Amino acid sequence: MSIPAPAAEATPLGLLPLARTAVDRGSERRVAPDLFETIRADAGTRVMYLASGRTLVRDGALVLFEPPAAGFGDDPVYLGRTLEDAQVPLGTDVVLVTLPEPDEALAVDGAAWVSLREAATHLGALDAGLFVEAASIANWHSVHTHCPRCGARTVPEQGGWVRRCPEDGSSHFPRTDPAIIVAVIDEQDRILLGSAAAWAGNRYSTLAGFVEPGESLEAAVIREVAEESNVVVHSPQYLGSQPWPFPCSLMLGFTARAQNAEAKADGVEMSDVRWFSRTELTDAVASGEITIAGPISIARNLIERWYGGTITEPEANARA
């Protein structure tokens, strides 16, 4: 197998699988107290159901429903208006309704409840954007039910994008945790990949970590790589980002150059770190010696950017 040429250093990642969208979130409409009553009266409004991180998909598209006669139920979220014609007309209002568990009665005509990891690469920009938005906001609501100041149960407002405490009047907004993820390259043009201690099997990926308070993205790159692999890097270069709603991260992709090649896993977060040439990575993946991050991840895009093309995995190892 021929090995691709390396990517130019300044080449950005481009539009990543989970960064696509064709939704106007309509933040100016969220403040209307009768928002849900108004859009439920519109026959064109559609509902997206989400249960345990899964939604209904059929023929590579989300299945959206007419508003139920009984209303949207508890704690609906306004996702916005569609910005392209797809399975629904341009300008369609979409409301998220979260169910406690998948309702198989809704899975008709070949529809199936699937996760974002399973569906993302098969969906168009509109559906991918709706799914990422829905998963992210649903995750936030599920773990931010009480006021962090006084402990009272909060109530959703503004189309589901604010939770207000009825006791002290404080408002709480959805949070996103910034995390850097970096392709570390050495003087021999090898890439550094690591296997996290929490991962089962032989999975390897680029190094990543959360940005700490008061820290720049570039400083986080240098700190995280040193902590996890003992490798000192310089010249971090931003390449692109995408949301990662598992549960609430924004992944910010970088490349950086290694000052030293003596890599050693910290033994806490990382169980192993290894340098790979393109030939070594090709052989390791093809033989099943290792698996690498799935196609929806920014990690896979960072690896393939360095690699210079698509990495073919054995069919049994391919995953989201």
Image (tube, grey):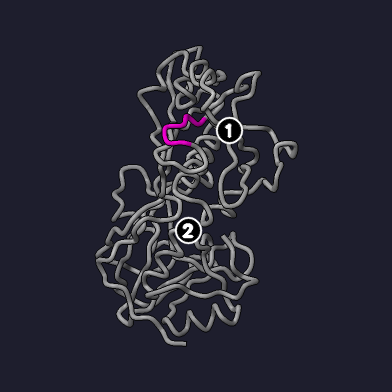
Front position in the image: 124 or 292: 124
First in sequence: mark 1 or mark 2?
A: 1
Disc 2 crowd rating (10 Å Cα; few below 14, some 14-19, many 20+) is some
> On residue 297, which mark appears?
2
Q: Which residue reaches farthest right?
A: 105
Residue 90 within the magenta-colored segment of the rendering: yes
Label 1 secondary element: helix
Q: Relative to the observer, which residue lies in front, 253 or 296?
A: 296
Residue 189 relative to residue 44: left or right? left
The image position of residue 62, as x and y in percent, is: 57, 44
Neighbor class of circle 1 (other Cα within 10 Å; few <14, some 14-19, many 20+) is few
Point 52% across, 27% down: residue = 45
- Residue beneath the point at 50% across and 12% down: 167
Q: Disc 1 vs disc 2: which is toward the camera?
A: 2
Residue 142 is tagged as 1
The region drawn magenta spans 89-94
